[in-house]
Image (cartoon, helix red, strand yellow):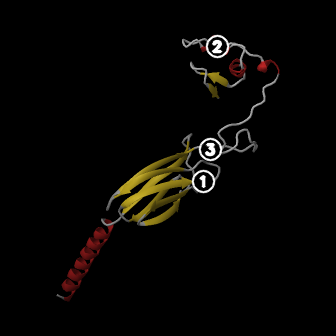
Amino acid sequence: MRNLTRSLCAFVAILSAGAVARGAELTTGAVLGSVATTAGKPLAGALVTVLAPSGRSTARSDASGRFTILGLSPDTYVVSVTLERYEPASATVVVLPGEHERLTFVLRPALKEIARVEAAGEAFSIGSTSDAFTVQGSQAQAGTPQASSSGLANYSRDSVQGAISNVPGVQQDSFANVIVR
């Protein structure tokens, strides 16, 4: 009788432990996935970060490019993947209780910087409504702007308007208004 009681207690304990584990499993979710190159080669060591208002977790991809993040509270997560020499990638997933979200990330090689160029100049003054331009040589000769239905092309020939219309980057609308491009 004593062995039967012990066996019955052990059986009830095993059932209770299983129920507790299943209950806990249904309150959290997981994000699973893989990281690979554009050629399909798995990438090991990629840092995978899941971020939501309810929390943040990280993991690294294994030798086969796979990662697993368990125990996530139900929420909307931004999952980002970074790895040196590759462009970062991200995705948004909704993690539900007892659910596993699966993601596949394909990382592109990062562009290599071969040179850096910086330029500074003041072609236009900030806040100024006008700027001075110098027109020299053949640009200063008045020409005939494009003909329009308004007849202003003939009116502006051999005038300042005609000279302005010959400057590179300057156009005139049908009313001879100057447009600087």
Estimate the x, y position of residue 140 in percent, counting from the top left: 78, 20
Q: Please name whichever residue, 119 or 158, is drawn nearer the observer in this view of the structure.
A: 158
Estimate the x, y position of residue 81 in percent, counting from the top left: 53, 54
Q: Residue at x 74, y 34 (%)?
A: 132
Task: Select label 2 or label 1 by which is in front.
Answer: 2
Residue located beneath label 3 in the image: 109
Would you call the spot at circle 2 few (<14 residues within 10 Å), some (14-19), or many (20 or more)? some
On the picture, is 6 further left or further right than 98? left
Tell me the quarter of the image containing the N terminus. Answer: bottom left
Q: Residue at x 68, y 20 (%)?
A: 161
Circle nearer the N terminus (3, 1) = 1
Q: Please name whichever residue, 5 or 165, is drawn nearer the observer in this view of the structure.
A: 165
Circle nearer the N terminus (2, 1) = 1
Cα distance in 3D space between marks 2 and 3 = 60 Å
Estimate the x, y position of residue 131 in percent, counting from the top left: 71, 36
Question: Is 31 placed above or below 42 here?
Answer: below
Residue 155 numbered mark, or none = 2
Would you call the spot at circle 3 few (<14 residues within 10 Å), some (14-19), or many (20 or more)? some
On the picture, is 101 further left or further right than 8? right
Residue type, numbered disc 2: Tyr
User: Quadrant location of residue 134?
Assistant: top right
Residue type, numbered disc 3: Pro
| Whether residue 117 is visible | no
Q: Please name whichever residue, 105 or 44, is drawn nearer the observer in this view of the structure.
A: 105
Cα distance in 3D space between marks 2 and 1 = 66 Å
Residue type, numbered disc 1: Leu
